Image: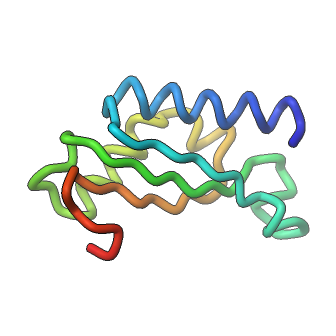
Amino acid sequence: MSEAAAGRIERIRQCLQQAFAPQRLEVVDDSHLHVGHAGARDGRGHYTVELVSDAFAGKPLLARQRAVYAALGPMMQTDIHALIIKAHAPGESAAQ
């Protein structure tokens, strides 16, 4: 992993940690799966984030996704081309 990619993952982690104080947070760089894809040509990455936070309790899926996009703010325009979001409240299974 390049230093730039590692730095980008760390910034994603920091944004999500600050916004949600998650009990679990995982950020995976999937960019290598999209080499040659139009969205990858400009250097922005493809990521999967999985987080478990009390902040998602009682919120529908769309609200959770919007909250994650908001937490990442400008990174969605400058660093991230595609994002898979797996946002759960404590006690929810990953299948929900």
Q: Quadrant of the C terminus?
A: bottom left
Q: Residue furthest left?
A: 58
Residue 25 x/y as whole percent: 46, 42
Q: Quadrant of the N terminus?
A: top right
Residue 34 place in picture, x, y as percent? 80, 68
Left or right position of 2 against 84: right
Residue at position x 63%, y 54% from top?
47
Residue occupying image coordinates x 71% and y 60%: 30
16 left or right of 55 in image? right
- Residue displayed at 51% across by 52% down: 49
| 27 relative to 22, above or below | below
For this rendering, which residue is in front, 78 or 11? Answer: 11
Q: Position of residue 89 (x, y in %)?
A: 22, 52
- Viewer-proximal residue, 5 or 76? 5
Q: How is the image coloured?
A: rainbow
Residue 3, picture quadrant: top right
How many labels sit on residues?
0
**In the image, is 37 to the left or to the right of 86?**
right
Q: Residue furthest bottom?
A: 95
Picture residue at 41% right of the left edge, 60% below the top: 86
Quadrant of residue 85 within the rendered picture: bottom left
5 or 45, which lies in front? 5
Q: Is residue 70 above or below residue 36?
A: above
